[in-house]
Image (spheres, grey):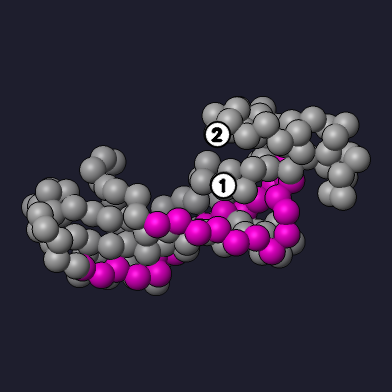
Amino acid sequence: MLYGEFVGGRSKPLLNLVERGAVRKFAEAIADPNPLYVDEAAAKRSRYGRLLVPPTFPRTFDYGHIEGLKLPSAGMIHGEFHISYERPLFVGEEVFCRMRLEDSYDKQGRKGLLGFLVFERTGESPDGARIFTMNDVVVVTEVVRRVIEA
């Protein structure tokens, strides 16, 4: 099992600031014209009363690293992604983010043995309240495995 010794390992929490300019650029990049992300007047009139972030924006945060776990810088495949929110995330907030390797398993593919890494990434407010949980799966191909295991 690829990286099996790191299952259960966690990164230390890292502070991320939800910056207005970064949210604007992200909304433009994903072509989402929702005014609640960029128009303060519209956001103030909304039920939230302030600027929101697009739902997938937490992908841009820094979640740190798990001590000793060195993932390759290239060659991994994005497998799956799911995010759930406890409450909306707002522009200007400070968010403490961390990640945990939840699972690692192998499957035989058409072109060799594939490794699957299941990560949980979380974001919390400064007082420790959970804002979101993001689960994603990364696929490591046979070619990349050979480099890692060499």
Quarter where residue 36 is shown: top right
Crowd class of label 1 (few under 14; some 14 to 19; many from 20; radius 10 Å): some
Which of the two discs, 1 and 2, labels the residue nearer the N terminus?
2
Where is residue 84 drawn, in percent x and y?
Answer: 60, 61
Mark number, residue 56: 1
Q: Is residue 138 left or right of residue 127?
A: left
Q: Is residue 61 left or right of residue 34?
A: left
Mark number, residue 39: none
Say whether residue 45 is visible.
yes
Q: Secondary structure at mark 1?
A: loop
- Kind of residue indicated by mark 1: Thr
Total number of numbered discs in the rendering: 2
State whether residue 143 is above or below residue 132: above
- Kind of residue indicated by mark 2: Ile
Q: Is residue 45 magenta?
A: no
Per the picture, the main secondary structure of the magenta-coloured stretch is: strand
Q: Secondary structure at mark 2?
A: loop
Say whether residue 148 is visible.
no
Q: CA distance from mark 1 to mark 2?
A: 10 Å
Nearest the camera: 91 or 49? 49
Region of the chain picked out in magenta, as a range = 80-106
